[in-house]
Amino acid sequence: MGATIKDVAKLAGTSTATVSKVMNGSYSISQETADMINETKRAGGRIVCVGTTSCRTLESLADENGFFHESSAWTDIFIYPGYRFKVMDALVTNFHLPQSTLIMLVSALAGREHVLHAYEEAVKERYRFFSFGDAMFIS
C-alpha cells in the first residue's frame, strides 16, 4: 500500500511527538468486568488486548497500580515510545500505516527494532496495511 521501511523508521524511531489529532472516545466498564480483569492479573494471567482501541481503553481505565473499578469517562490517551504500560501484556493489531499514532503505540509495546523488523518482513512479503489488512501478535 505504498509503505516503505523508511516511512516506518521515520516515525517509529521518535521518542516524543507532537500530534495534531489523537483518536478519542468514551468508555465504560462494569464492576463485574473490572473484577474479572483484576482477578486475572492477581492470578498471574495475561491481559491481551485485541485492537488498539481496547488497549487505549484499558490503559485509560487502570489506576496507578494497574487495577480497575467501575467507571465511565472520556479518553484521549496518546501512547508512544517511552510509555509504561499499566495493564496490557500483549496486543493483536493490524499493520498500521506509517506516520500514524497507532504505529507509535505499537512501537511503545514492541520496541523500535522489533517493529522495524516486522514491517520489513511485511513490506517484503507484501502484507496488507490499513484496518482490514494482515495482523500481528505482540507480546
Image (spheres, rainbow, N blue to C red):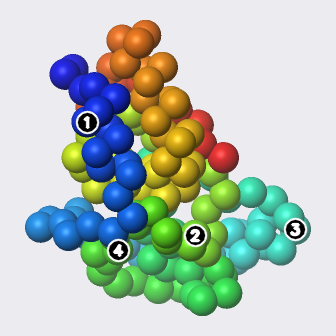
Q: Residue at x 43, y 29 (%)?
A: 119
Residue 73 spot, x, y in % from top left: 35, 84
Compared to 129, does 38 lie above or below? below
Label ID, residue 77: 4
Residue 9 located left or right of residue 135: left
Task: Give the amino acid type for the residue marked by disc 2 in the picture.
Answer: Phe
Answer with mark 1 or mark 2, whichever residue precedes in sequence. Answer: 1
Answer with mark 3 or mark 1, whichever residue precedes in sequence. Answer: 1
Q: Number of marks in the image?
A: 4
Task: Give the amino acid type for the residue marked by disc 4 in the picture.
Answer: Ile
130, 41: nearer the viewer:
130
In which image quadrant can residue 33 be found? bottom right
101, 81: nearer the viewer:
81
Answer with mark 2 or mark 4, whichever residue precedes in sequence. Answer: 4
- Packing grade of label 2 (10 A; few <14, some 14-19, many >=20) is some
Answer with mark 1 or mark 4, whichever residue precedes in sequence. Answer: 1
Does the residue at mark 1 contact the one at mark 4 (Cβ under 8 Å)? no
- Packing grade of label 1 (10 A; few <14, some 14-19, many >=20) is few
Label ID, residue 7: 1
Gap between marks 2 and 4, in whole Å?
12 Å
Give the labeled residue for mark 2: 85
Residue projecting furthest to the top: 125
Gap between marks 1 and 4, in whole Å?
24 Å
